[in-house]
Image: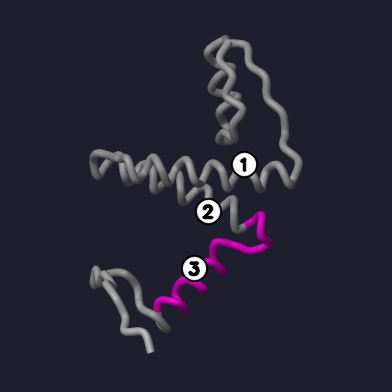
Amino acid sequence: MPIYNKLVRDAIPEIIEKTGKDFSIRTLEEDEYKTEVKKKLGEELEEYKEAATNEEAVEELADILELLHAAVKIHGSSIEELEQIRQAKAEKRGGFDKRIFLIEVEDD
């Protein structure tokens, strides 16, 4: 039986159960969950970076977004507050739409 030892989406046990396969799961403690969400976010980011098509990239971005929803809750916040912070930073410092690549800044 393959061993995964990773955070999975909530419906995965039901999906596996429907296949008739045996499996084992456990509920993570809060500190473990925080660690695993961060780990999973890194994995999904790597998968996004490796995406070969726009469709694959958007699929990975959806996974990242789902993990962002989980992560803000871990930190006692909400996706709405995250969006407010994003908007405030965009107003103060701009977004990334202009594709500006900083090469160097003269040192005083």
Q: Is residue 83 above or below residue 74?
A: below
Marked residue nearer the N-terminal end (2 or 1): 1
Farthest front residue in view: 108
Q: Is residue 107 above or below residue 69?
A: below
Quarter of the image where one finds residue 75: bottom right
In the rendered structure, which segment of residues is drawn in magenta?
73-90
Residue 10: give x, y in percent of width and height: 59, 35
Regarding mark 1 in the picture, which secondary structure is present there?
helix
Residue 69: give x, y in percent of width and height: 55, 53
- State the separation of the CA atoms marked 2 and 1: 13 Å
Q: Which residue is mark 2?
A: 68
Marked residue nearer the N-terminal end (3 or 1): 1
Q: Quadrant of the C terminus?
A: bottom left
Which of discs 3 and 1 lies nearer the camera? The answer is 1
- State the separation of the CA atoms marked 3 and 2: 11 Å
Q: Total of numbered circles in the picture?
A: 3
Q: Label 1: how many residues lie within 10 Å, few (<14), some (14-19) or many (20+)?
A: some
Q: Label 3: how many residues lie within 10 Å, few (<14), some (14-19) or many (20+)?
A: few
At 68% from the left edge and 62% from the top edge, which residue is drawn? 76
Quarter of the image where one finds residue 93: bottom left
| Residue contact between numbered discs 3 and 2, judged by CB atoms under 8 Å | no
Say which amino acid is labelled 3: Glu
Regarding mark 2 in the picture, which secondary structure is present there?
helix
Q: Which residue is mark 3?
A: 83
Front position in the image: 94 or 22: 94
Q: Of the numbered discs in the image, which one, if any, rests on residue 36?
A: 1
